[in-house]
Image (tube, rainbow, N blue to C red):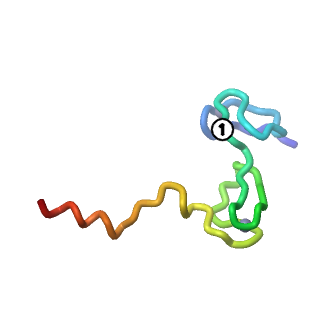
Amino acid sequence: MSAFKCPKCEKTTGGNEKFCMDCGQPFNISCPNCGNSWRFMFDYKFCPTCGNNMKKGGSVSNPQQTNKEVKK
Ligand SMILES: [Zn+2]
Ligand SMILES: [Zn+2]
């Protein structure tokens, strides 16, 4: 296992930690659909097991609602 730098605070960890001991950044991401988990460092956009879109559902902005506040 190689050392792994925290993406948030850049603390170097041993590579076995589940969370950053400095800022609490989780190093494992798990798919809400199938439960598979992997290291944060891979930054997958889709679950490698079931294809679930991991970028969806977090901070998604709805593009259909941006035009609504133009009119006063
Ligand atoms: Zn950190
Ligand atoms: Zn999955």
Q: Position of residue 29 (x, y in %)?
A: 71, 52
Quarter of the image with the C terminus is bottom left
Name, please, the residue furthest toward the right. Answer: 1
Which of the 4 image quadrants contains residue 57? Answer: bottom right
Q: Three-letter amino acid code at disc 1?
A: Gln
Quarter of the image with the N terminus is top right
* Relative height, residue 19 to residue 48 (above, below): above
**In front here: 40 or 30?**
30
The residue that disc 1 covers is 25
* Relative height, residue 1 to residue 71 (above, below): above
Numbered disc 1: secondary structure = loop
**In front here: 11 or 32?**
32
Q: Residue at x 69, y 72 (%)?
A: 51
Name, please, the residue furthest toward the left. Answer: 72
User: Is 55 positioned to the left or the right of 61 in the image?
Assistant: right
Q: Residue at x 23, y 65 (%)?
A: 68
Q: Residue at x 84, y 41 (%)?
A: 2
The quadrant of the picture showing ligand 1 is top right
